[in-house]
């Protein structure tokens, strides 16, 4: 399909293209539209009437009407799916079974709908569900329960009973949940009492076994020998004593390492001793006095000797005092050491005894702590049990409140006749138009001139209306004749050489109107004054002789088989310049006669004898005759019937013409329905009626002779033979 590959891109559809499809397929649209509308109307009128009643209820999550002992309302807070859940609850078996029992629907509906035969609960529940509609009021906790029935009283009763049974179900469910919870709490409380008793027995047994008295124990364990504050004070005292000992021991060690002179200098500063200070002062005065006497007296002088003895005595006393101080300091260091050791020993001993006591009594106090925990948990359970019991007894009527009971409404709500009919009209129109476009989508045949020129890449030379007859019978002024005049003009301007005067008319398939087109086109040429011959070369299904009621006993085959002369096989018609050569009888042994040399000779002779020669041919897709003729004559016209064969078939026909070397002038679009497709109006002869009727009062109508004279000026017709 080279032509399809080389075809230009399809243009965008215009609104008028859609309108054209609607006009063409209006029969389908109207049929579907009427079918849907009539069906909708009949079904609506036959549908039994149904009445409705609506009950409005307010629903809350599970909680009592007043605040519980905890001070916090029951429930889980806001739940966006609460109302949706309640919709399903209302239509559940638990609620609908109560409705069936309350309204005795088993017996009532069995008599009403099942000829008295008992119905199952599931069937009745399914019927109730089909008759219920639940709606939530936006941004509220209201639910509307709408019930339908063929009885207005039954509809109201059903809606109210569903609301009542749903309310009772919610209250019963709340009580069941509370009772089950309280029962569970009481069971846990009994288990906890047993655990407390067992824990108490264990504590008593351990107290006796370990010999622990209440005076020895506090709340968390055995009473320690040293309390935390006592231990802190003793530790602080021990640290202080240790610091004093270290200070004195360091001072003693430092003083022992000094000589006498250094000690005399250091002791007054390191240790505050009055006696030593006085001796040192006296020694200093005695030495000063000795120095003064040494100036005035000799060492042998009694005063000097007395002074010297006094100095020596004071030195001895100072040394003795220093030794005494060092001995006293050693004693203080030893005493501090002994006190520090005793204090450290007592603290460690008390700690060890506390550790031993705690380790010994640990099982007892662990058991005692477990007993206290069990008692606390038992108290919590007891309080919660009593709280739930009180909450259970609180009123819960407002969980479901019937705000607006359903009332009897004797006005039927189903079917909505005006709405159903309007919907039927709209739906029928939509389906009809949709089906029309779907059929148009499936139809791949030629629909417009653009389809032809885009897919076949060939010009459209003429557009022939639908239901056209023979121009010979209708006359030169026939509205249909103008379409063929347009075709004739386009052919004359399309041929490249005036010597080209033989034309074969072909089509892809049978029934596309090529025989009528060939004969009418020849008639138009003949009415214009040209000598024209029409050759019926469709040897298998000849039709031209039937159009003008002439014999087919002599014709083309007789001449080609050399049974008759050319003049003997040519017949005249009503139009003086139009002749016909029928097909003649085709012997079974001469099927390839059109490809003979005799046929080529005939074509050559006819070219010289007539101004124009038109050949009618069989379908080019069926037999080879049309291809042979296309290769032997000067020009080829391809006839395509409007909306008949698929476009690929027409493309293939054009390719076959080109492959055999045929000169395709263009396309003739045939059998156009002008009443459905107005886009072809100005291509057809209807313009002829409009033009001549409009100018009938002011200008004379153009005659055939005038048209012939005008065409003679513009066309270079070769002279007759």
Image (spheres, rainbow, N blue to C red):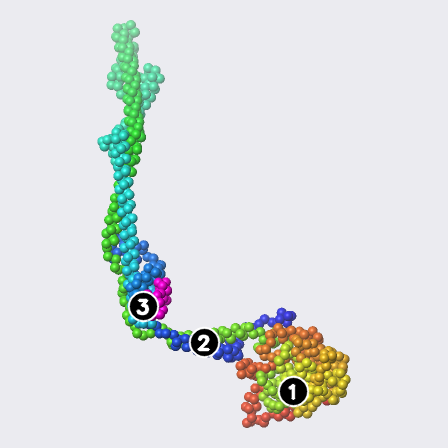
Disc 2 vs disc 3: which is toward the camera?
Answer: 3
Q: Nearer the viewer, residue 400 or 483?
A: 400
**Residue 617 visible in rendering:** no
> Total number of numbered labels?
3
Q: Where does residue 350 sit, x and y in percent of width and height?
A: 28, 27
Q: Magenta segment range? A: 105-133
Residue at horizontal 32 percent and vertical 74 percent from the top: 411
- Residue contact at pointers 2 and 1, CB within 8 angstroms: no
Q: Where does residue 693 sit, x and y in percent of width and height?
A: 55, 91
* Mark 2: secondary structure: helix
Q: Which residue is mark 2?
A: 36
Is 462 one of the magenta-colored residues? no
Q: Which disc number belongs to residue 108?
A: 3
Q: Nearer the viewer, residue 359 or 541?
A: 541
The first of marks 2 and 1 along the sequence is 2
- Image quadrant in which you'd find residue 52: bottom left
Q: Which residue is mark 1?
A: 546
Q: Main secondary structure of the magenta part?
A: helix
Q: Where does residue 36 sit, x and y in percent of width and height?
A: 45, 76
Whole-number angstrom distance, CA of label 2 to CA of label 1? 47 Å
């Amino acid at each position: 399909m080279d032509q399809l590959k080389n075809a230009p891109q399809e243009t965008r559809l215009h609104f008028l293209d859609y309108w054209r499809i609607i006009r063409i397929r209006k029969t389908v649209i109207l049929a579907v539209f009427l079918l849907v509308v009539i069906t909708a109307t009949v079904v609506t009128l036959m549908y039994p009437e149904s009445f409705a009643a609506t009950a409005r209820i307010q629903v809350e999550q599970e909680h009592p009407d007043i605040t519980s002992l905890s001070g916090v309302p029951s429930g889980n807070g806001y739940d966006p799916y609460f109302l949706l859940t309640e919709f399903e609850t209302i239509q559940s078996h638990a609620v609908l079974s109560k409705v069936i029992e309350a309204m005795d629907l088993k017996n009532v509906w069995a008599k009403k709908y099942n000829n008295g035969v008992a119905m199952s609960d599931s069937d009745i529940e399914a019927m109730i569900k089909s008759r219920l509609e639940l709606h939530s009021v936006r941004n509220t906790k209201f639910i509307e329960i709408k019930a339908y029935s063929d009885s207005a009283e039954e509809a109201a009763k059903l809606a109210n009973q569903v609301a009542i049974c749903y309310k009772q179900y919610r209250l019963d469910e709340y009580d069941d949940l509370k009772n089950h919870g309280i029962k569970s709490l009481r069971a846990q409380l009994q288990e906890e009492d047993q655990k407390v008793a067992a824990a108490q027995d264990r504590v008593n047994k351990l107290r006796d076994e370990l010999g622990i008295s209440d005076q020895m124990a506090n709340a968390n364990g055995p009473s320690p020998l040293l309390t935390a504050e006592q231990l802190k004070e003793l530790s602080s005292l021990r640290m202080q004593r240790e610091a004093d000992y270290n200070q004195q021991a360091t001072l003693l060690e430092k003083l022992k390492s000094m000589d006498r002179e250094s000690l005399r200098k250091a002791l007054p500063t390191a240790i505050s001793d009055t006696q030593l200070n006085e001796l040192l002062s006296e020694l200093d005065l005695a030495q000063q006095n000795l120095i003064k006497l040494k100036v005035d007296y000799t060492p042998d002088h009694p005063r000097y000797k007395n002074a010297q003895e006094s100095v020596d005595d004071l030195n001895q006393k100072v040394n003795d005092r220093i030794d005494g101080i060092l001995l006293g300091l050693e004693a203080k260091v030893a005493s501090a050491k002994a006190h520090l050791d005793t204090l450290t020993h007592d603290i460690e001993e008390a700690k060890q005894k506390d550790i031993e006591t705690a380790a010994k009594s640990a099982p007892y106090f662990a058991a005692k702590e477990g007993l206290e925990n069990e008692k606390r948990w038992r108290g919590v359970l007891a309080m919660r049990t009593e709280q739930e019991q009180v909450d259970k007894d609180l009123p819960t009527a407002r969980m479901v409140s019937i705000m607006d009971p359903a009332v009897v409404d004797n006005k039927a709500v189903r079917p909505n006749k005006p709405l159903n009919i309007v919907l039927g009209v709209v739906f029928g129109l939509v389906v009809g138009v949709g089906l029309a476009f779907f059929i148009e989508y499936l139809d791949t045949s030629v629909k417009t001139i653009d389809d032809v020129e885009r897919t076949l890449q060939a010009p459209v030379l003429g557009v022939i209306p639908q239901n056209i007859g023979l121009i010979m019978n209708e006359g030169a002024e026939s509205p249909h004749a103008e379409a063929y005049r347009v075709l004739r003009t386009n052919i004359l301007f399309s041929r490249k050489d005036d010597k080209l005067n033989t034309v074969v008319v072909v089509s892809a398939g049978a029934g596309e109107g090529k025989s009528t087109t060939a004969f009418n086109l020849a008639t138009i040429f003949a009415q214009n004054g040209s000598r024209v011959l029409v050759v019926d070369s469709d040897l298998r299904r000849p039709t031209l002789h039937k159009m003008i009621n002439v014999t087919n006993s002599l014709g083309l085959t007789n001449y080609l088989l050399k049974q008759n002369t050319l003049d003997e096989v040519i017949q005249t018609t009503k139009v003086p310049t139009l002749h016909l050569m029928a097909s003649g009888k085709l012997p079974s042994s001469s099927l390839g006669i059109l490809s003979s040399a005799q046929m080529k000779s005939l074509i050559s002779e006819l070219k010289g004898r007539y101004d124009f020669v038109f050949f009618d041919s069989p379908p080019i897709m069926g037999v080879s005759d049309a291809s042979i003729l296309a290769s032997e004559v000067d020009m080829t016209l391809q006839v395509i019937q409007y909306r008949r064969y698929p476009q690929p078939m027409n493309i293939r026909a054009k390719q076959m013409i080109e492959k055999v070397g045929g000169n395709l002038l263009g396309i003739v679009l045939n059998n156009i329905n002008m009443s459905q497709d107005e886009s072809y109006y100005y291509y057809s002869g209807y313009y002829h009626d409009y033009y001549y009727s409009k100018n009938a009062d002011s200008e004379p109508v153009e005659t055939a002779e005038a048209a012939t004279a005008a065409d003679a000026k513009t066309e270079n017709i070769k002279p007759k033979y």
